[in-house]
Amino acid sequence: MIKTINKIEEVIDFAWELSQNDLYASYHRIKSMEKLREDFERALVRDNESIIACYQENVLCGVCIYFWQCDEKYVQTTQFLIRGDYDETAEELIDHIGKQLPGFELYIGVPFSNKAANQYFKKNNFECIESSIDTRLYNLKIQMNEKHEQVEEITNSNYEEYAIFHDKYAISLEMYYNSENLKKDIEKFKILVFKQDGAIRASIFTKKVRNMGEIFGLFVDEQYKNNGIEDILINEMLMQLYNKFGSLDEVAYFIDEDSPDELNSALAAGFQINDKYRCYKCIL
C-alpha cells in the first residue's frame, strides 16, 4: 500500500536509520537528522515535491521523496529508501509516481554499496546515465590569487557563444542543466571557460547554495585534455569562489569513474573521495 505522507514523524526515524546504512542508503547522502528533517519539511510545503511511503501488511518498508518539473517532464528522487523485499517495494513506489506523472523521465540515485538497488535497476533495464565518484573539498581556502589570462567568466552578455560549447557535452550526457536550463538559473551559477586561439576549449560551471558549492561539470575538448587545463579551471574556480563567498563549508564535485585525469586534478586541488554513486533513468 502506498500512502502520501503529511506528518514527518511517521517516517523520519525509518528514513534516518536506512540513510545511514551503506546497504540501504540512496543518494544524496544525509549527514544529520536536522538536514533530513529540513528535506522532509521542504517537501511538505512545495507544490512540486512529495513524500510517499510503502507499507506491506501495515509494516513500513519504503520511503521516497521526489520532486518534478512539469515543463521538462522530469522527476527525481532525493530519497529512495527500502528495507525488505527491494523489488516489490521499488515497483510499488515507482508505479505510484508513474500514475501521478505519466510520460515523465524518472531519475533515481543510489550508492555503489546498495547492491539490492543496483541489481534491481539493472535487471529491470533502467538506463545507467551516470556512474560517478563523489569528491568533496571542506572549508575552502584560497589556493592561488593570480587570474589565468586564458580564463574568462560567462555572463548573460556572452552566454550565446558559450551555449553552443556547453550543449556539445551536456546534451550527450543527458544533463538537466543543458544550455537552456542553465541560462534560466545563471544567477545561481559561476561559469568559467578556457580559451585558445579565440575559441572556447574547456569550461567549468559551479552552483552555490547557502554555504556550499557544487561543481556540476568540467568539459574539455578531446584534443586539449590532459594538458593541465583541468588543473587551471578547477583552481581558478576555487579561487573565484573564495574571493566572492569566503571559506565555503563544502564544495562537492562528481567525477565520472572513467575520468582518472579529472579525478587526479581534483585530488591535487584538495578534494577527497567521499563516495561512489550511480544514477538510473526510466520513462514512466
Image (cartoon, rainbow, N blue to C red):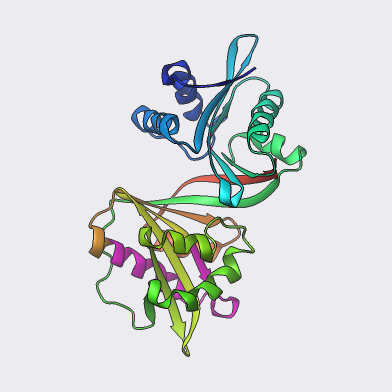
In this rendering, position of residue 56 left or right of residue 137: right
Q: Which quadrant of the rendered structure holds the C terminus?
A: top right
Residue 208 as seen in the image, left or right of residue 253 = left
Image position of 198 with respect to 51: above or below: below
The secondary structure that dominates the magenta segment is: helix
- Residue nearest the observer in this picture, 210 or 259: 210
Check residue 222 for magenta coloring: yes
Percent position of residue 64, x then y: 55, 29
Q: Is residue 271 above or below residue 117?
A: below
Residue found 57% across the figure and 64% down from its top: 170
Say which of 243 and 71 sits in front: 71
Quarter occupied by the N terminus = top right
Residue at x-position 49% and y-position 36%? 49
Is residue 180 located in the magenta-colored stretch of the structure? no
| Residue sitting at the far top | 57
Task: Name the image quarter holding residue 37.
Answer: top left
Above or below, 148 relative to 179? below
Q: Residue at x 46, y 37 (%)?
A: 29
Question: What is the x, y in percent for residue 155?
Answer: 38, 72
- Magenta span covers which residues? 217-241
Residue 143 in the figure: left or right of residue 52 = left
Q: Position of residue 109 (x, y in %)?
A: 57, 42
